[in-house]
Amino acid sequence: MIEIGLLPSETASELLGAWTADTLRQGDLRRRLALDLWPSLPDTPWGISWSQHMTSMARALQPYSHCSPDLIQWTLAFQRPTAAEGQMLAAIGSGSFDQDKAERLALLLTVFLWNLLVVLNQLDELEPPEADVLHALSSELRATTWLDAGEEWHDQLVPHVWFKQ
């Protein structure tokens, strides 16, 4: 929604009015932004277009956006494989921690912050402290081994679900 502020006033008013009236769906809004705005934004640190990036962002968020049996499994913190083949030790409850899941969520939040800084930089050129953060995040995202980026980077951030029905 923040990106709508980068559009000309008339277009932004039209989209916000339709969104408020609940006549504009998320997919329709993304298509409009892909036509009217995203081509003017810089490529991502991994060299894909903003449109491809936002498609992956939406796919990366989907597993977190609705309570489901798959998402509930995220309350399990997988500790280590057990001695028996095919078994794992999992903890549940307050204080349980899964490093892999924590790193995936931290990376997803970093990508969100990078998105926000790029959009803010389009509104008004960032001052040196914020511009430095944007540059550093771009460098780190380009170099991370957690994100083998490309058009389908979202697959690397989805929760690992162990018990499919």
Image (tube, grey):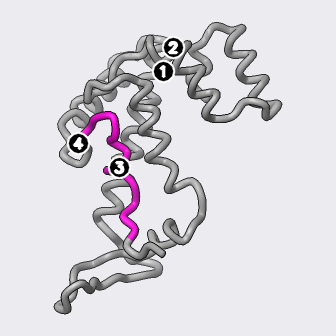
The residue depicted at 28 percent of the width and 29 percent of the height is 138
Q: Is residue 140 above or below residue 100?
A: above
Looking at the picture, how far across and down is residue 8, in whole percent? 63, 7
Q: In the rendered structure, which segment of residues is drawn in magenta?
A: 148-161
Would residue 112 be found to the left or right of residue 135 on screen?
right
Q: Where is mark 1, residue-wise?
A: 120
Determine the CA span between mark 1 and mark 3.
27 Å
Q: Main secondary structure of the magenta part?
A: loop
Q: Where is mark 4, residue-wise?
A: 148
Q: Nearer the viewer, residue 129 or 160?
A: 160
Would residue 99 be found to the left or right of residue 163 on screen?
left
Q: Where is mark 2, residue-wise?
A: 123
Task: Name the quadrant containing residue 81.
Answer: bottom left
Q: Is residue 146 above or below residue 25?
A: below
Residue type (three-letter) at the residue carrying disc 1: Leu
Task: Name the quadrant containing residue 101.
Answer: bottom left
Q: Nearer the viewer, residue 12 or 122?
A: 12
Q: Nearer the viewer, residue 149 or 152?
A: 152
Looking at the picture, how far across and down is residue 134, in whole percent? 33, 26
Determine the CA span between mark 3 and mark 4.
10 Å
Residue type (three-letter) at the residue carrying disc 2: Leu
Determine the CA span between mark 4 and mark 2.
29 Å
Can you name the residue that lies furthest to the front here?
A: 165
Dot 1 crowding, Cα within 10 Å, few <14, some 14–19, many 20+: some
| Between discs 4 and 2, the one toward the N terminus | 2
Q: Is residue 96 above or below residue 18?
A: below
The residue depicted at 41 percent of the width and 24 percent of the height is 50
Which tag is nearer the camera, tag 1 or tag 3? 3
Identify the disc placed on residue 155: 3
Determine the CA span between mark 2 and mark 1.
5 Å
| Between discs 1 and 3, the one toward the N terminus | 1
